[in-house]
Amino acid sequence: MNGLIIVAIAVVVVLVVAAIVWGILQKRRHERLRERFGPEYEHVVEETGSRREATKELEARERRVDELEIRRLTPDEAEGFSSEWQDVQAKFVDNPQLATAEADDLVARLMRARSYPVTDFERRAADISVNHAGVVEHYRAAHDIAQRSGRGEASTEDLRQALIHYRALFDDLLETNADAPRTAERLRRVS
């Protein structure tokens, strides 16, 4: 066999192996993101139109949030927010629209206390999706209902659902340094 043919075959083999390795790495990247972001992964794929663009977006979110100094709450801070949540829930009976608006505000203040940027809703949802992927759908649903409520298009049942969605996000964000499990258990008993 001619030396040139052997080199050509070797180059082709190397290129095929490189393509296979690249494909495997890409698949692992997509799987890692799908596992980390859950349903948010598919939401971003649908929003961007491709898995490749979704991967870029989600990895950019991870980098952006990694640069933030997100902190856990102290037990006293968590207790204060929990108390405020109870007030919001109590207001629902007399004024569901006000309670929903206050729940949205309380969630934004809780995010700010944890050092999440709270510039606009889409940015908040994107940032929350990195560390709280399991509840970002709740946040979007609650926000949508709150928007409809502002236009007078939400029923009392819709507002009740919004409060439930806000509560899911609130509970997930209400992490503390020392006693996150104990706080979560206490909140479940209060509900």
Image: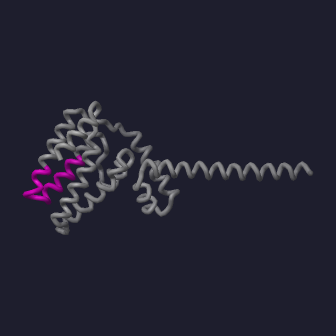
- The residue furthest bottom is 153
Horizontal side of residue 115 vs 79, given as left or right: right
In the image, residue 99 lies in the stretch drawn in magenta: yes
- The residue furthest left is 94
Residue 118: percent from left, percent from top = 29, 48
Horizontal side of residue 91 vs 122, given as left or right: left
Residue 79: percent from left, percent from top = 18, 37
Closer to us: 138 or 151: 138
Residue 33: percent from left, percent from top = 47, 49
Display colour scheme: one colour
Residue in view at x 33 percent, y 56 percent? 137
In the image, residue 161 lies in the stretch drawn in magenta: no
What is the magenta range? 88-108
Horizontal side of residue 5 vs 162, given as left or right: right
Residue in view at x 15 percent, y 44 percent? 84
**Residue 141, above or below 73:** below
